[in-house]
Image (tube, helix red, strand yellow):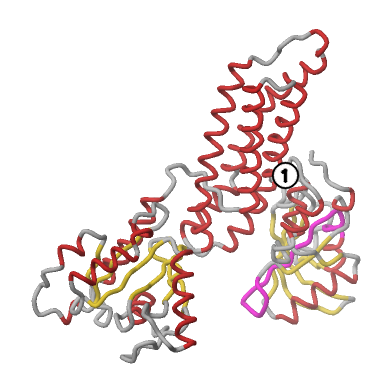
């Protein structure tokens, strides 16, 4: 199946606690490997005296007691999964015990004393990949699913784990492989000067592949913010209510609020999930000229956060702002307002202080503007709705979204190789050089799903998993 080094293909039996560390109502201990059932039978006494190792059935739970050299440890439920119909593709056992840390440690210790090895980080999922239960992109999605903290992150990870993304990559690779095979065939008959691969069809295919890969690459920016949170910079002059707004959005006193200008001297970050999207709000130092060294550093960091933010909330005091202020904002932040990759929203704060509607209001409405009172938490829901709308506008229409940097880099390299093939055909370079670029494109597409991989890639991917998964 995969060109995997021998050291990854070990046949020992492994074990680990699969539930989070610490005490709880129950804990689950997993075993996987050829000796799983035999080891269970050494330490497990079923309530049903007629039950034996020979007549135990797969995917059934059995009640009994775990013991160590005759000493009872706990009453448990044991489940046997006969390979290949298990998560790892091997014989596996799961033991559900009481959640005492002592009980968990004692059962693990008993398993180790009976010849079972402690699992490494991600080793169960690595075995699932090596045994063909999932490809590499699906295995990586397992970690993303565990780490998902929002509805969208969960949806994207679940789709990838189901194979939606890897099926698309396999489809692209199969199309390219057909022509690559014909090109290789031409090399075998190079002395006869024949063409098996129709060049016109190949140009059409290359354009199609480049377009589809381009769509996937464009989805990475959106996928990355789904996974890590959408960065939202809250900026503005001192004392316009930026910290009060952050507290109102988070519904907690996260930032210090004061009438003294320059209170916020560094960025303050926190996250909140709104309608399934994770937003990472960044409260920044007020924008002004300052002789204070510490405050000046904070203002420099504000501009750094503006550069990195996807959404910029410019907070102003609506009771004090005038036409000149609006023009100043439009001029200073023109590049961000016109940047398609960023969303610039005016937040007109302190509407509770308005006695009359100011004449400059129509100038602000030319910008995306939300009128609020952060102090009284008025219209905060309208701002939240606006944020969600802006994210949905940038959403990719299809369900295939790239969230993994490794996948992005492999797809980018594949796209460059395909462009080289296309240019090589235009320039009329020799077929053997075209074949090299085709092989490169196939190689990078294969990298995504693990059809082509290395020790270092596997080690890096699975070391980030939790032990027990």
* Residue 432 horizontal side relative to residue 273, left or right: right
Q: Is residue 216 left or right of residue 6?
A: left
In which image quadrant can residue 41 be found?
Answer: bottom right
In the rendered image, is residue 109 in sight? Answer: yes
Above/below status of 77 relative to 139: below
What residue is rendered at 62% in x and 41% in y? 166
From the image, tell me which residue sits under label 1. 450
* Secondary structure found at label 1: loop
What is the tally of numbered marks visible in this picture?
1
What residue sits 34% from the left and 66% below the top?
A: 332
Q: Which of the 4 image quadrants contains residue 185?
A: top right
Quarter the C terminus occupies: bottom right
Q: Which residue is at the front of the view, 31 or 442? A: 442
Residue 137 in the image, given as x and y percentages of width and height: 65, 48
Asked if residue 345 is among those painted magenta in the image, a careful observer would answer no
Picture coordinates of residue 234 (x, y %)?
A: 38, 72
Position of 18 with respect to 49 (left or right) is left
Q: Quadrant of the N terminus?
A: top right
Vertical arrangement, residue 22 with respect to residue 445, above or below: below
Range covered by the magenta-colored residues: 20-38
């Amino acid at each position: 199946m995969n060109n995997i080094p021998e050291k990854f293909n070990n046949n020992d039996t492994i074990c680990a606690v699969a539930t989070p560390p610490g005490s709880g109502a129950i804990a689950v201990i997993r075993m996987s490997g050829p000796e799983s059932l035999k080891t269970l039978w050494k330490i497990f006494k079923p309530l049903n005296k007629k039950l034996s190792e020979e007549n135990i059935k797969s995917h059934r739970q059995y009640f009994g007691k775990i013991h160590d050299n005759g000493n009872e440890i706990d009453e448990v439920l044991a489940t046997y999964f006969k390979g290949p119909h298990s998560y790892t593709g091997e014989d596996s056992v799961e033991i559900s015990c009481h959640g005492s840390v002592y009980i968990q440690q004692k059962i693990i210790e008993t398993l180790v004393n009976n010849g079972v090895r402690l699992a490494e980080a991600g080793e169960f999922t690595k075995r699932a990949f090596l045994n063909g239960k999932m490809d590499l992109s699906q295995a990586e999605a397992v970690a993303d699913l565990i780490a998902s903290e929002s509805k969208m992150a969960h949806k994207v990870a679940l789709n990838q784990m189901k194979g939606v993304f890897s099926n698309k990559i396999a489809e692209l690779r199969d199309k390219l492989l057909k022509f690559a095979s014909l090109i290789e065939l031409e090399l075998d008959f190079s002395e006869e000067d024949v063409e098996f691969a129709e060049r016109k069809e190949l140009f059409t295919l290359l354009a199609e592949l480049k377009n589809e890969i381009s769509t996937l690459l464009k989805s990475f920016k959106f996928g990355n913010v789904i996974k890590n949170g959408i960065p939202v910079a809250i900026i503005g002059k001192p004392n316009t209510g930026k910290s009060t707004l952050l507290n109102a959005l988070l519904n907690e006193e996260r930032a210090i609020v004061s009438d003294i200008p320059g209170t916020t001297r560094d960025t303050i970050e926190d996250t909140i999930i709104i309608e399934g999207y994770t937003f990472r709000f960044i409260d920044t130092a007020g924008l002004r000229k300052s002789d204070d060294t510490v405050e000046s550093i904070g203002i420099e960091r504000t501009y750094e956060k503006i550069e990195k933010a996807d959404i910029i909330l410019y907070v102003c005091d609506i009771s004090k702002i005038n036409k000149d202020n609006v023009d100043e904002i439009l001029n200073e932040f023109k590049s961000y307002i016109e940047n398609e990759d960023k969303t610039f929203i005016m937040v007109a704060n302190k509407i509770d202080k308005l006695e009359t509607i100011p004449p400059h209001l129509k100038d602000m409405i030319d910008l995306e503007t939300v009128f609020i009172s952060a102090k009284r938490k008025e219209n905060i829901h309208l701002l939240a709705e606006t944020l969600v709308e802006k994210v949905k506008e940038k959403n990719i229409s299809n369900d295939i979204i790239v969230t993994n940097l490794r996948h992005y880099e492999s797809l980018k390299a594949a796209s460059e190789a395909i462009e080289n093939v296309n240019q090589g055909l235009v320039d009329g370079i020799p077929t053997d050089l075209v074949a090299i670029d085709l092989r490169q494109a196939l190689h990078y597409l294969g990298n995504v799903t693990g059809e082509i991989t290395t020790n270092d890639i596997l080690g890096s991917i699975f070391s980030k998993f939790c032990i027990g998964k």
